[in-house]
Image: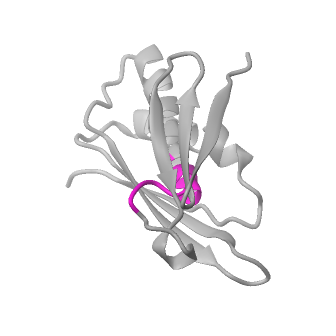
Amino acid sequence: MAVEVRAVYEGQLRCRLTHGPSGQEFVSDAPVDNQGLGEAFSPTDLVAAALGSCILTTMGIVAERHHIDVTGATATVLKEMVTQPFRRIGRLTVTIRFSRTYPDDQRQLLERTAMTCPVHRSLHPDVEAPVQFVYPS
């Protein structure tokens, strides 16, 4: 199934993006370190956001199928840019924090599932994307 996302350049390094199916809109902005105002998600920030939300969503799908409650789980993604040989995302460090503990079999299922998220699988091999899982003590 194809989904259309429309981007309109509004000037001053800002774009308005529209999600075709829902009509929801948001703005992206160039980051301060690349001539922008940094007043909204940059395009590369959106990649980091997509990775974190994709991992949580993919785990949520499998968790529901197996009657595992992952409500309250969070994803934090630290995006690091590199400039050589050209400007690009160099590393997306992901930390998944769970609000509860799980038996080993459920933990393994959740962690294995996280690594199958479509965004993670779509990243170029040059982009490092380690994922750490943190459970309450």
As for residue 41 lying within the magenta part, the answer is yes
Quadrant for the C terminus, please: bottom left
Image position, residue 92 (x, y; %): 55, 63
Q: Residue furthest bottom?
A: 84
| Count of numbered labels shown in the rendering | 0
Asked if residue 58 is positioned above or below residue 12 in the image, the reply reads: above
Range shown magenta: 39-49
Quadrant for the N terminus, please: top right
Image position, residue 90 (x, y; %): 64, 71
As for residue 2 lying within the magenta part, the answer is no
Q: Is residue 8 left or right of residue 103?
A: right
Asked if residue 118 is positioned above or below residue 136 in the image, the reply reads: above
Q: Residue at x 76, y 78 (%)?
A: 86
Q: Residue at x 57, y 60 (%)?
A: 13
Image position, residue 125 (x, y; %): 77, 61
In front of the other: 99 or 123:
123
